Amino acid sequence: MSKRKMFFRMITASLIRRRSRMLVAMLAIVVGAAILSGLVTIYYDVPRQMGAQFRSYGANMLFMAGQGQSSFTMEDVDKGLSHIDSGNLVGVAPYRYESVLINEKPTIAAGTDMAGAKSTSPYWFVSGEWPDESGEVLIGKKVASTFKLVAGSEMSVRYILEASGDEVEDATMDFTVTGVLDTGGAEEEYIFISLSDMEALTRKENAIDLAELSVSASQAELESYVKDIGDHVPEITPRLVKRVTQSETTVLSKLQALVLLVTVIVLALTMICVSTTMMAVVSERRREIGLRKALGASDGSIIAEFMGEGLLLGGVGGLLGSGLGFVFAQGISVNVFNSSISFQPLLVPVTVIVSILVTGLACLQPVRSATDVDPALVLKGE
Amino acid sequence: MSLLELKNISKIYGELKALDNVSINVEKGEWLAIMGPSGSGKSTMMNIIGCMDKPSLGEVLLDGVDISKESAKNLTTIRRDKIGLIFQQFHLVNYLTAVENVMVAQYYHSLPDEKEAMEALARVGLSERAKHLPSQLSGGEQQRVCVARALINHPEVVLADEPTGNLDEANENIVLDLFRQLHREGTTLIVVTHDPEVAEAAQRTIVLDHGRVAREVINENFAD
């Protein structure tokens, strides 16, 4: 039998046949490795998870009319969208704004795609229903209050097509209020109708003033999209909503720093626990160490055997921990972010290697103290 | 030339002389017993002969080499190559089987050989118990594993500290029979004991008292 085979036979026998003691150290390593693996998974998945969460706070990119132009078309919007990864696009809402008269009082009407508005502004609170047919209107809370309108009310909207002197050419459309919009912002002073109703009312087709986009991407990706679209689609001026994108970046970096800090603390605690357990192991095996030295073991052999046990423990603990870590990360993701995460195979060897390194470091001091054992103590029977 | 020569050795701890100018020769193939009350210096002498301690004064020649001046690292090598140890409390590694315990001595000496370890266990009548853990063996069986371990590397000297101290009479006789067999095969035996019956089994007995050789007894009735 080779020395190496005997070495592994001894350290595996020590771990398997003395499992009650080694279970404590193993448990510490498994828990540490699970938290490490879980938190690293979350660390890398947080931008995606949080990105989706941040999208509920509204659009983070705008398309405005290109230089020297007052509006752009839906075809221009599509050209701009072709430069954004479709998987990252959460929603797009084109808007056309016109001043209309309600009971002869000027009000802003916004023509939009209701489904798009819903996806780019998920924080809008609607009492009633969103319009889904021609002739239906969503009105802001302040408009509802001014004109004493509620869901189900009928209203007329008048648009001045042309006015010269006393001659006024206008168009009027009747709408049914389906819901009242509460946003806490300027939208409460607007009414929202479909783009097709806006085109019919104003007799002007395919003119977009602004498009709001909700894109799930990092700050760098968003900036690259803006540059790309700016370079290739002159009809559009793309802009980032800096207030949103910057706060996203700030929150994400703080969250990632927190996760990193917790990971480091957990690793340090694991190291302390393993070190304490190994110290106890060395202490209770002083007689065995003395015996081995009496049988001719060099300090190097003693170090190799105890370090071997520690590293094997670290490897097995790391392997178990990486599996548990995925379960842990999945639990957090499902409960906190309402979405699942994918298994990262690379994390398994990384967790095992880190566990082995941490266990190795934790074993250094206990193993060093093992070499101080005097072999004569076994003869003394102490 | 004697296999082991202790020349005027003393071991001094502060004011205390654990060994005081002791000289002993042990011939190759001899069976020597060392007796004495507690505190007489037996353990100190065992440690020095077993290369686990060095005398404060004097020389210890093992196979012609003065081991009293060797470094701790060299003493480990000498102990591994030339000395087989048998303990009163057996000192088997509790998570290794009987055969693995024997192989541990091979592991530190040269190369583990399970077949040879099994033969050593068979020699002490334990081939059927080779795969048992120490906790599954009786005291006598554990001591026999200890004997097999001490012999596996064919040492120059077998050093036994109270080898029958924890055994009943039946197992004591088994161990003494093993020693007789070893002696017949030419093994040099040094046995530290309190038990006069064990000492009487040896060729010669040295009695220590207060760190000195009080007397030396040749066993006229010695028979293999």
Image: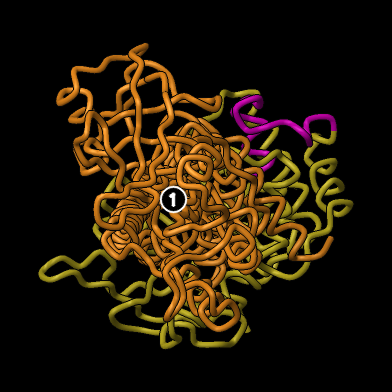
Q: Secondary structure at mark 1?
A: strand
Q: Nearer the viewer, residue A230 or B42?
A: A230
Give the residue at x 70% y 55%. Answer: A8
Residue B137 falls within the magenta-colored stretch: yes
Q: Nearer the viewer, residue A20 or A215?
A: A215
Q: Is residue B131 visible?
A: yes
Indicate the chain on which mark 1 is placed.
Answer: A
Task: Give the color of chain B as drawn.
Answer: yellow
Q: State which region is magenta.
A: B128-147
Residue B155 horizontal side relative to residue A339, left or right: right
Q: Is residue A253 above or below residue A342?
A: below
Residue A164 horizontal side relative to residue A120, left or right: left
Q: Is residue A342 above or below residue A335?
A: below
Q: Quadrant of residue B127?
A: top right
Q: Residue furthest left?
A: B15
Q: Nearer the viewer, residue A240 or A324?
A: A240
Where is mark 1, residue-wise?
A95
Residue A23: x, y in percent?
A: 49, 35
